[in-house]
Amino acid sequence: MVASKHDAAALDTLDSLIGQVRAAILAALDQELQPLDMTAAQYVIIVKLAGSRSESMAALCKTLSYDPGAMTRMIDRLERKGLVTRLRPLDNRRSVMLELTEAGLRMYPKLTECVAQVIRRFLAGFAQDEISELKRLLQKLLANA
């Protein structure tokens, strides 16, 4: 709860800064991933699928807070690129499971290197203790979500 007008202004500024940082990182990621014909949104899907053997499309939508229609279009593009495949379990034909293909698994380290480049650029000039403190504060922010 906001205690004063000053606190409200500080929260508005914080909200704006968080939004600006997010937008700047996504724009930088899109630019860095462009030579690989990938976007930041597609990268997030690849990373999520790389961390599991397979994932249902519904669960992925929920986890990533993506609209099902938008998710379908992104998966269509990733499938055309040969990076993702859709599977229908025999015991539940209404469900759609997603897996990375061999090409998707090979693409994953290239994508993570692009992302690491962007993060290094954003953290340029930060001391190691500042990076640790930023990480700690962001984790605390997420814990309060």
Image: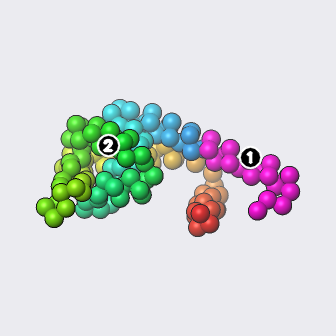
What quarter of the picture does the N terminus occupy? bottom right
Q: Magenta stretch mostly in which secondary structure?
A: helix
User: Of the residues shown, which amino acid type is indicated by label 2?
Assistant: Thr
- Residue 13 is marked as 1
Rendered view: 40 above or below 90 = above
Question: Which residue is more in the foreground, 1 or 9?
Answer: 1
**Contact (CB < 8 A) between labels 2 and 1?**
no
The percent position of residue 87, horizontal first and vertical second, equals: 18, 53
Question: Dot 2, how many residues are within 10 Å of its Cα: few (below 14), some (14-19), or many (20+)?
Answer: some
Question: Dot 1, how many residues are within 10 Å of its Cα: few (below 14), some (14-19), or many (20+)?
Answer: few
The reply to whether the magenta stretch includes residue 18 is yes
Question: Which residue is more in the foreground, 36 or 113?
Answer: 36
Q: Earlier in the sequence, mark 2 or mark 1?
A: 1
Q: Which residue is mark 2?
A: 72
The percent position of residue 66, horizontal first and vertical second, equals: 43, 48
Magenta range: 1-20
